[in-house]
Every structure is written in structure tokens, then in C-alpha cells.
Image: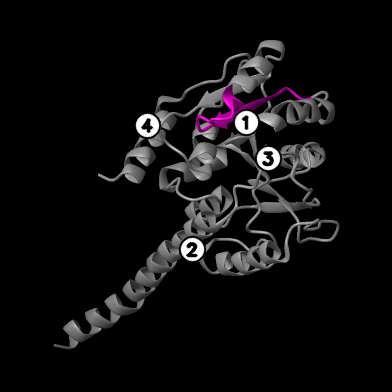
Amino acid sequence: MGTEQNITKAWRSLYREGVSSPGGSEGSLELTIVVPTFNEYANVTSLVNALETVLCGVQWEVLFVDDHSPDGTAEQIRSASVANPRVRLLERIGRRGLSSACIEGMCTTIAPFIAVMDADLQHDEGVLPEMLHRLKTESLDLVVGSRAVPGGGMGEISAGRVMLSHLGSKAAHLFCNSELSDAMSGFFMLRRSFFEKCVARMEGIGFKVLLELLAASEMPPRIAEVPYTFRPRGRGSSKFGVCASLAYLRFLGRRFSRSFGATVRRVGEPALGGLLHRR
């Protein structure tokens, strides 16, 4: 069994064990914000302070999932948790990956609503209350922060990344169960019950966990989009690069293979049955 399969087996086992969140009962904790980190030491304090400002009146926690960053990110999070019980850390040793980090984080919370966002301050935490309100008051599975709907924007990111985002969203529509304007978004909130329906079919490979959720859902999910503008990175360097692009292409390739195989089976098996019947 390969390394990726071992990792997938590990977080599926973690989900089945039902690890719970300290610092709050299921009746009091409303929202967990899962934040994957790698070398984000300089942004931890700023993000926690921003969440404190916008989530007043909400029973929330932030769960940082750190892949053993060499810059001391985990130590910074531990220091923050001493002063603020809303701050939690899951440090992973010997494995890396944004998608699997998000999945492991979502597996470890009992909150009925879960948000995923980056630590680099590019996602606008100010729209989290709207996301939560819509999930609470509407029959939705998922609310996505979109840069492509009216009121949203790509900000100051490079033209190359803008083009890749548009192309990625168009390609994703071919293999996923929804029509999102910004399928490449890494900023969203969902019901834990929806995650529970999808998690057993998720691979935890790559960097776009939203795409995995959409692809893993057996039925088209009920989705709303809220606009936000992508902000410049706070501090540190972007994790987006050639490796991330290749991981996305591999993901789409696997989805294409499965979709193509399913289509062949749907068309071929009845035709073969007809031939055999005529014989």
C-alpha cells in the first residue's frame, strides 16, 4: 500500500473514532474554522485577532492544522492557545498536504458548522457571519466564498493565477455535481452532516478540498455563494506553484477516468446484453 493510501486510511480511521473538540460541548460550540498551515508563523496572531472581531456573539473555535512547519508556526499557535481557549492545534508529523489537512481538521470537530480558510489573510473573514447565517436559515449544504460573482474580485493576484482559476473552474464543472462560479475557491463553510456524507469517498490528495467535496457528493449539493475580494497575502510566501498545479491536474485526470469509465459501462453493458440476447 502506497504512502497516499496509508494517509487516507489514517484519517478515515480518525473520523470513525469520532474525536471530539475540547473546550465546549456539542450544544454550545457552533462553528469550527479549520485553517491548514505551513510556515505561517507571522500570520497566526493577526488571523486570530481578526476572527475575534468578526465573530462576536458566535460560539466558535479556530483549529490550526500544521504540517510540522520549520518556522515555528506550531509553537506560535500553542502560545496563542494559552491566552485564548478558542485556539486549537493539530500538528501532523511526517505527512503534508492541504486537502488532507483540511479533512483531518474537519474530522476532529463536533461543531455543526465548519469553515475552511487560509492562514495568509487573503480570505475575507468578514463574510463568515453571513455564511453562518445562511446555513442556519436556509436549506443549504455549503456556502462558498466566491471571487467571481458580482461584488467579488480577484484582487491583485497575477494574471496567470487568474487564468488558471478560470480554467480550473470550467474544467471542474465537467466532473463535479454543481455549477459554481468559483470552483477553485479555498474559502467555504458547510454543515458537518454534509461532510459526514462525503468523507468516506474523499481521497485527501491535492490542494483543493472543495473540489473533492463536490466530486464526493452523491447528489448535487445545495450551494450558495457569497462575494468576497481576494486580498494580498499578509506575510510569508505563497504555497501555490508547479506542484500544486500538477496535483490539481492529477485530480482532474482521475475524475475524467472515472467519469469516462462509468459512461463506457452505461453505454457498453446494455449494448453487450442486447448482442448476447440476440445470439
The amino acid pointed to by label 4 is Ser
Mark 3 or mark 2: which comes first in sequence? Answer: 3
Pointer 1: what residue? Answer: 112
Closer to viewer: mark 3 or mark 2:
3
**Mark 1 burial class by Cα count in 10 Å: few <14, some 14-19, many 20+:** some
Mark 1 vs mark 4, foreground winner is 4
Residue 35 spot, x, y in % from top left: 62, 35
Picture quadrant where residue 18 is located = top left
Secondary element type, mark 1: loop
How packed mark 2 is, by other alpha carbons closer than 10 Å (few <14, some 14-19, many 20 or more), is some
User: Residue tagged by mark 2?
Assistant: 249
Q: Residue furthest left?
A: 279
Which residue was labeled with disc 3? 236
Disc 1 residue type (three-letter): Pro
Residue 279 position (above or below residue 41): below
- Give the vertical position of 27 relative to 5 (above or below): above
